[in-house]
Amino acid sequence: MAVYRKTYRPYEGPLTPEWSRFLIIPRYAFEEMRRKRFLALFYLASFFYPLVCAIIIYVVHNLSVFSAVGLPQPKALAINAGFYLHLLGFQSMLAFFMASFVGPGLISPDLMNNAMPLYLSRPFSRAEYVAGKASVLLILLSLMTWIPGVLLFAFQGYFEGAGWVASNLRIPAGLFFGAWIWILVLTLLALALSAWVKWKPVAGALLFGVFFVAAGFGGVINTVLRTNWGHLINISHLIGTVWITLFEEPVRRGAGAVFFRVARGEGIPLWACWASLIGICAACLWLLGRKIHGVEVSR
């Protein structure tokens, strides 16, 4: 409008609380994801295995169902820490694929279209921008990993009683902390690659490369040097080692699903696993800090 008319009035309505302004980013991100049918179907399919686990828990505690339909009663399945550890591993593997589809498209479009100054010119800090983008994956992956596990633990606790729940509190604690370790590492890696690689297919391929190529290279180091320290660059091995400690599960065939196997005799010290994971997260935060800013100087 023309300035001389003096009809402009500033916005005088209610303001969004400062602590929740970053949530505007996941709101629109989820709306965009909802329009992508493949992602929606894949996300719904990821809850099939927890549903199967719920059926197993129910059947184990209601073996009389087989007698009612004239079938022989099967041997009771041991639903213990290993059961939930395998559930966490399988769901975390699906979460990796979901992050590979969603993560590369979170930051790269903003950088390609020079939208970063529009974000940061508003009362919106760089930390809030990163938190908003990260919350997309944090929410999605939480719903896929530790939340179904904790609900299944509560479901089994309903049948077993308070005594069983009190003696197995390490299981929900392992589900919660183990899933969050994996989610944080995966989220920061996906955001860092999305910020530095503007082409989404390449960023997704690099995320696969970080896990699978690095794991293969670490295996070569172990074979050539006859050591186990090559696992320091194998993120899935680091996560599996931490999970075994959280669940107090002895190393048998491995921890979690195939993606997180820890073979007998191939472990590395727990402190080394934590140091490597913290170093990976710190490097991702440094990369994000270098790339996300309101002004870019071209030389």
Image (cartoon, rainbow, N blue to C red):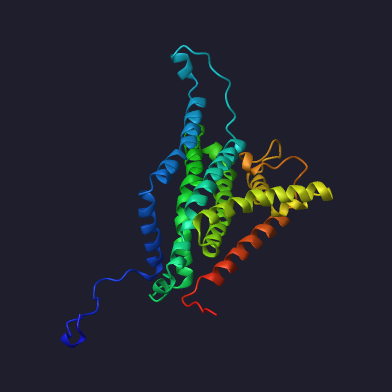
State the image coordinates of residue 58 (x, y, percent, origin top left): 47, 28
**Toward which corner of the image does residue 17 lie, by quadrant?**
bottom left
Q: Is residue 228 visible?
A: no
Write the residue at 47% across / 71% down: 126
Quadrant of the drawing holding the N terminus: bottom left
Left or right relative to 36: residue 297: right
Front-most of 150 and 219?
219
**Toward which corner of the image does residue 19 lie, by quadrant?**
bottom left
Left or right relative to 260: residue 17: left
Quadrant of the drawing holding the C terminus: bottom right
State the image coordinates of residue 254 (x, y, percent, origin top left): 68, 39
Q: Which residue reaches farthest bottom?
A: 4
Left or right relative to 88: residue 10: left
Figure check: 26 above or below 241: below
Front-most of 6 and 147?
6
Q: Which residue reaches farthest front?
A: 299
Left or right relative to 31: residue 183: right
Write the residue at 38% across / 48% down: 36
Write the residue at 56% across / 42% down: 88
State the image coordinates of residue 159 (x, y, percent, origin top left): 48, 32
Q: How many marks?
A: 0
State the image coordinates of residue 158 (x, y, percent, origin top left): 47, 35
Q: Is residue 147 visible?
A: yes
Figure check: 130 above or below 60: below
Q: Which residue reaches farthest top?
A: 70
Front-most of 260 and 200?
200
Front-most of 213 and 269?
213
Figure check: 89 above or below 19: above
